[in-house]
Image (tube, grey):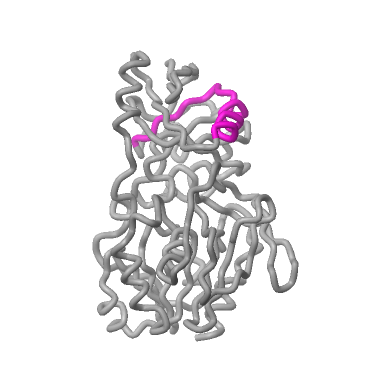
């Protein structure tokens, strides 16, 4: 079956459909990972986005996700033979209602996004659609209520360790929870809009601000919550959580021309000059370090801030994902270091 990608500049690319049928609109992004297509598609940080896999084959590893919204569609060069076996990428996308389009020159899309230097929107469809109809969808498309759409609505408990950790859910990754559980933590997963008073009343030893989707500056309510909590509870902030913490401390955040999405992104420690290969998935970055913070990691590729330590309020933040599995495990020590301080 045919499928089409219709870009916001009117370009149309034809490919082969797999996964779910239908039509979706979203922000077009690309990921440079060599595997883990299921983890990529089910990552809540891709909410409202169409993800292009630049590696030629859709290598899939790991779990099936937990049913929360992730990517709207997946584009690749070559997908596996469609046989609907359990766990197969075609069947997996069908189960999640995600459109897949194969047979695409993904290098062209990556180049197009880099040269555009802006947010590029597109329509992915297995249906008959002309440019005008697609253009109307694109014109009206906007990612709204991103964190609220992917966050849990009720408190959930995980693990039975001796260390009590609260995770404020902006779009957490399951491997983050698994990494903390392996380190002897008892986790309370909290909805994104949990009030500061409720968090402090829980008596937790550590608050984790999770990764997630969307523009951090739109989370005014959460920024005020974190501002209230600063200095009252130790914090570890990851991805979107890092950006929200920076805003709460008076820093600034801006959109990147092209986001950082992949499992092969190098960062350098400012303390040791050591390079770590990390997994990242974000379209925004902290561009002004708050006076209360000290830059701890820098993205080697473009020099953007990849980590900030806040010693006065006992908080650590990183832009990368320490728990990446599949992917590099260089940065797992981030969890060890913060837990040693409790």
From what the image shows, is residue 50 above or below residue 307?
A: above
Give the x, y percent position of residue 320: 56, 59
Residue 77 appearing in the image: no
Residue 324 seen: yes
Question: Residue at horizontal 33%, vertical 16%?
Answer: 132
Q: Residue at x 48, y 19 (%)?
A: 16
Task: Locate the N terminus by quadrant.
Answer: top left
Q: Nearer the viewer, residue 114 or 177?
A: 114
Query: Is 215 within the magenta?
Result: no
The answer to whether residue 333 is above or below residue 121 is below
Q: Position of residue 9 (x, y in %)?
A: 45, 22
**245 or 77, which lies in front?**
245
Residue 252 % position (x, y):
47, 61
- In-image side of 96 versus 251 (left or right): left
Query: In this picture, which residue range is highlighted in magenta?
Result: 97-116
| Along the line of sight, the residue nearer the viewer: 249 or 44 | 249
Vertical placement of 51 versus 186: above or below?
Answer: above
Q: Magenta includes 106?
A: yes
Q: Is residue 336 above or below residue 9?
A: below
- The residue drawn where x is 52% and y is 25% is 102
Please give the count of numbered marks on the rendered protein.
Answer: 0
x, y percent for residue 168: 36, 67
**Location of residue 135 by image quarter:** top left
């Amino acid at each position: 079956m045919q499928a089409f990608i219709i870009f916001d500049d009117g370009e149309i690319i034809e490919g082969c459909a797999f996964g779910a049928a239908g039509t979706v609109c979203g922000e077009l992004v690309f990921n440079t990972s060599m595997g883990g297509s299921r983890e990529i598609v089910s990552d809540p940080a891709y909410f409202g986005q169409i993800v292009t896999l630049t590696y030629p084959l859709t290598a899939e590893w790991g779990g099936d996700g937990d049913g929360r919204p992730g990517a709207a569609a997946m584009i690749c060069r070559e997908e596996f033979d469609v046989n609907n076996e359990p766990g197969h990428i075609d069947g997996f996308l069908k189960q999640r209602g995600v459109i897949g389009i194969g047979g695409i020159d993904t290098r062209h899309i990556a180049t197009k996004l880099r040269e555009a230097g802006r947010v590029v929107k597109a329509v992915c469809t297995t249906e008959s659609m002309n440019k005008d109809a697609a253009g109307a969808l694109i014109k009206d498309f906007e990612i709204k209520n991103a964190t609220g759409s992917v966050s849990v609505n009720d408190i959930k408990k995980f693990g039975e360790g001796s260390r009590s950790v609260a995770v404020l859910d902006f779009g957490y990754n399951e491997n983050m929870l698994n990494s903390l559980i392996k380190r002897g933590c008892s986790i309370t997963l909290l909805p994104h809009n949990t009030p500061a008073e409720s968090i402090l009343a829980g008596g937790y030893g550590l608050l984790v601000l999770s990764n997630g989707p969307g523009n951090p500056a739109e989370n005014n309510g959460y920024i005020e919550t974190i501002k209230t909590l600063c200095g009252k509870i130790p914090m570890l902030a990851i991805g979107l959580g890092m950006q929200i913490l920076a805003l709460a401390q008076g820093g600034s955040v801006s959109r990147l021309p092209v986001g950082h999405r992949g499992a092969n992104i190098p960062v350098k420690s400012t303390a040791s000059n050591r390079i770590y290969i990390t997994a990242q998935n974000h379209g925004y970055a902290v561009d002004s370090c708050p006076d209360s913070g000290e830059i701890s990691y820098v993205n080697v590729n473009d020099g953007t801030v990849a980590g900030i330590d806040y010693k006065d309020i006992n908080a650590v933040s990183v832009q990368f994902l320490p728990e990446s599995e599949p992917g590099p495990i260089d940065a797992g020590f981030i969890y060890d270091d913060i837990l040693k301080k409790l």
